[in-house]
Image (cartoon, helix red, strand yellow):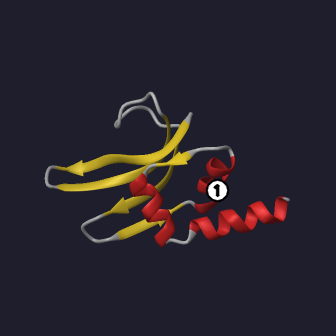
Amino acid sequence: MVKLRLKRCGRKQRAVYRIVAIDVRSRREGRDLRKVGFYDPIKNQTHLNVPAILYFLEKGAQPTETVQDILKKAEVFKEFHSNQTKLN
């Protein structure tokens, strides 16, 4: 199963995170399938590759709670649900 979750980067006391699609059995800094975004909690910046995120969500990837909150703020789920209704 694939999850969308955060991968810690940066230095001590100055963490930044990549949002990655990764196998659930991998550890936090394990090998990811694809990098789909970036999140800096200190500057509160987010950069998302929305088409890649939508692709993994359509394939059944489950976002973690934190990633889900980030995606809700960026209104990615609205695009996901509108794409779902277009397909049906």
Which residue is at 36% across, 31% downward? 27
Task: From the viewer's perspective, tell me whether residue 60 is left or right of residue 38.
Answer: right
Task: From the viewer's perspective, tell me whether residue 6 is left or right of residue 83.
Answer: left
* Residue furthest left in the image: 13
On screen, residue 10 above or below 84: above
Which residue is at 56% across, 60% downward? 49
Callout 1: SS: helix
- Residue 12, image x and y in percent? 14, 50
* Residue furthest top in the image: 25
- Residue 74, image x and y in percent? 50, 71
Circle 1 residues within 10 Å: few <14, some 14–19, many ≥20? some
**Quadrant holding the C terminus:** bottom right
On screen, residue 88 above or below 32: below
Question: Is residue 5 or residue 69 the one in the foreground?
Answer: 69
Which residue is at 55% across, 38% downward? 2
Give the amino acid at mark 1.
Answer: Leu
**Quadrant holding the N terminus:** top right
On screen, residue 8 above or below 82: above
Total marks in image: 1
- Residue 83, image x and y in percent? 75, 63
On screen, residue 84 above or below 10: below
Q: Which residue is mark 1?
A: 54
Question: Is residue 68 or residue 33 the one in the foreground?
Answer: 68
* Residue furthest right in the image: 88
